[in-house]
Every structure is written in C-alpha cells, then in structure tokens.
Amino acid sequence: MKCLVLLFAVVSHAAFPMGWWDAKEPLKGFDLSPTELKQVSIQSGWSSDDPQLMMFEVSNRLSGPIYCVGASFEMKDGKQRQKAFEPKIYVPAGQKRNASVRGIEKKDLKTFGFSCRCMRKAPQADCENPYQ
C-alpha cells in the first residue's frame, strides 16, 4: 500500500510542473469599451406578424467574438425594462447573428441599449476566442 501511495505522489508531482508550461492565461468576460461598441452594429425592427416581437441583427466587426447578454429599454412613459437573452447572442468575429425579444411594442419604445461582452486576458486586451 505504501508503494502505491508513493507511486501516486511521484506521478502527481511529475505531472504537475508540466501543466505550468502548457497553461494559458485564463480569459475573463469584460464589457466592451466605447471604442469597441462602435464596431458592433445593431439593427432593429418589428415582426409584421407580431407587433410585440422586436427583432435584432447584431454585426461584429471586432477581431474576436462577442456575446450579448441582454437589452435595456426606455419606454415613452419613462419606465425602464430589462430583457435577458436566453441563450446569449454569440457573434463570431466578422459575422452577424439574429435575436428577438417579446413584449416590446414600437408605439411604447423611446430607446434601447445592448449589453455586450467579450473574453480577454485583461480589461484593455483584445477580445479573444476562448475555444482556440
């Protein structure tokens, strides 16, 4: 039994330092900067079949992928509404994706904004693809 424990300790110890050489710096989710947001285009409109279905097309001109987690809406009566995207809208670099939210009527909406993020090593670093 002592040999088995000792062997496990030696193998574990030998494998542990190798992980340090191969480990990449972890990526974290950060909000897009104002400069980055200028490279994300959001087109919106309503379904002709359903006046409460607001549709979006999100275009990403950044060098890395982004994901949009939700939208905030300011209504003409001054009320604020938040809608989360389930699932989040994942937009690869140089591509477009479509999404929609229900319950927002054109006649009631004053303005809207999106909350988009990307994965990066630090707040000022470039957006990176976490799957590469």
Image (tube, rainbow, N blue to C red):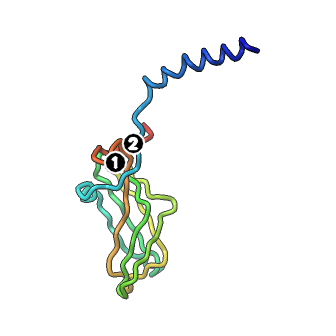
Tell me the amino acid under the disc marked 2.
Asn
Query: Which picture quadrant has residue 6?
Result: top right
Tell me the tag on residue 65.
Answer: none
Residue furthest to the top: 3
- What residue is pinned by disc 1? 93
Q: Residue at x 45, y 81 (%)?
A: 51
The quarter of the image holding the N terminus is top right
Amino acid carrying label 1: it is: Ala
The foreground one among 102 and 46 is: 102
- Secondary structure of the residue carrying tag 1 is loop
- Residue at 42% over, 74% down: 54
Q: Position of residue 2 (x, y in %)?
A: 73, 13
> Where's residue 25, x and y in %?
39, 35
Element class at badge 2: loop
Q: Which residue is mark 2?
A: 129
Image location of residue 20, percent across then percent down: 45, 25
Q: Residue furthest front?
A: 2
Percent across and percent down for residue 92 are 38, 49
- Given residues 18 and 98, the one toward you in this image is 18
Q: Using the image, determine if residue 16 lies above or below residue 32.
A: above
**Relative to residue 13, is residue 61 drawn left or right?**
left
